[in-house]
Amino acid sequence: MSNIVAIIGRPNVGKSTLYNRMVGSRDAITDDFSGVTRDRKYGFCEWNGKRFGVVDTGGFVQNSDDVFEAAIRNQVKAAVEEATVLLFVVDAQTGITDLDDSIAKWLRRSSKPVFLVVNKVDNHKAMMEANEFYGMGFDNIFFIASISGSGTGDMMDAVTELIENVPDLETDLPKFAIVGRPNVGKSSLTNALLGEERNIVTEIAGTTRDPIHSVYNKFGMEFVLVDTAGIRKKAKVEEDLEFYSVMRAIRSIEDADVCILVLDAMQGIEAQDLSILRIAQKRHKGVAILVNKWDLIENKETNTIRDYEAAIKKRLGPNSDVPVVFISALEKQRIFQAVEAAMEAYNNCQRRVKTSELNDLMMEIIEATPPPSISGRFPKFKYVTQLPTNFPAFAFFVNNPNYVRDSYTQFLENQLRKHYNFTGAPIEIYLRSKD
């Protein structure tokens, strides 16, 4: 995912409504990820056959002493640094404000393309009054009403003209991305994998802005290490580091088959880690978790690996079937086990179960533990098959899918994981009418 569109503007101009329009309408896409601090969302959008990330930033308030507004200001700066296109949203009903002028002056210093999006233009009178925004001097200006969608199609057409189609890497090798919060050891892990013997590394054309991916070929395993924040060297910006890490993660996750999430053993798993993990799982990527800096943990008798792993999986909730490896990238401890865990997650994503075997197992389980009724109606399962997707997906045919509770769907997934090794792989279950 080398393309990100960032929505920027002062508070209460309709940025979130535009974001919802872009990621939630029938022509747009798919996933919507709420972030971990206020006014922060990440999503994915498709338009005119092109796919890109969308970031909804908080309301920009220049030179404010408020701690939240200062954090939002840093988030906006990080979004500008990473974005391909900037949507600068203003409010037609209030006209041009001093804050709009301040943001405009700041954006003009950016080399990124800026679209001025005049929102809340929902009638002819509003359109006439909105003409004052031409005076802001932006070449690309669009008049929209994000609530109704008026004018957003033309805006999206213009955005996609600047979005490059990102081809898949021309390789059949597994693609692994190292992701995580800042300062958890991503660069150290990358160096440990690639820097020990440079003759194991080759370079192939990649798909991100810094188009180099490294091929690891050692100990009988070969894979592509997808470009990550740990590899790229970029100019320093004043950013909210956690927000910045998610922006980078969005890029890397889309290109990868498996995401290697690196944690800091001294800090444990935090909300930001969970946010990155859920983005990967929503995009149907395999996941392996590495707990780095384990060599720095004291009193290992108290903080045993078993207890530490249990605490992590408790935070993961129902998504806890992922491999967890405790490493020290600096000391190169258990690096090979980390690679094995990532490869296991990749292989489990490719796992296929014969339809006859699947039905023999699951129909027997369903008969022994039937689903509960809803309003006196019992769902009746007839058939199950694995779908031809690049991740484990199963279709259960039932007389009425509306009769099946979410808790029973989770039960079916748990049974599949119990009887087959899908550790590290996402599972999707689709309920379909038997007709």
Image (cartoon, helix red, strand yellow):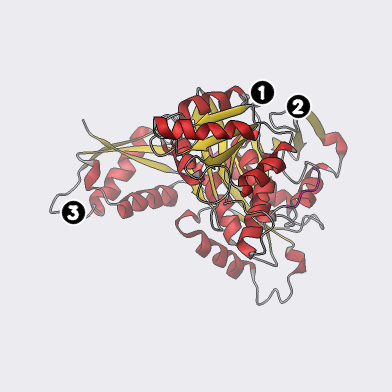
Span highlighted in magenta in the image:
234-238
Residue 83 in view here: yes
- Dot 2: element: strand
Query: Would you say the residues marked 1 and 3 are in contact, meaning their CB atoms lie under 8 Å apart?
Result: no
Give the spatial CA distance, label 1 vs label 3: 50 Å
Give the quarter of the image for residue 147: top left
Q: Amino acid at mark 2?
A: Ile
Residue at the (59%, 64%) spot, across then down: 309
Q: Residue furthest left?
A: 376
Q: Main secondary structure of the magenta part?
A: loop
Q: Amino acid at mark 3?
A: Ser
Query: Would you say the residues marked 2 and 3 are in contact, meaning their CB atoms lie under 8 Å apart?
Result: no
In percent of width and height, residue 111 lies at 74, 33
On the rendered image, what quadrant is the N terminus found in?
A: top right
In percent of width and height, residue 131 lies at 53, 31
In percent of width and height, residue 10 lies at 58, 49
Q: Amino acid at mark 1?
A: Glu
- Residue 63 is marked as none
Task: Find disc 1 in the rendering and name its residue.
Answer: 170
Task: Find disc 3 in the rendering and name its residue.
Answer: 373
On the rendered image, what quadrant is the C terminus found in?
A: top left
Q: Residues within 10 Å of mark 1 (few under 14, many from 20)?
A: few
In this view, the residue in front, 421 or 69, is 69
- Residue 204 is marked as 2
In this view, the residue in front, 356 or 399, is 399
Residue 341 in view here: no
- Dot 3: element: loop
Give the spatial CA distance, label 1 vs label 2: 9 Å
Residue at the (40%, 30%) spot, across then down: 124
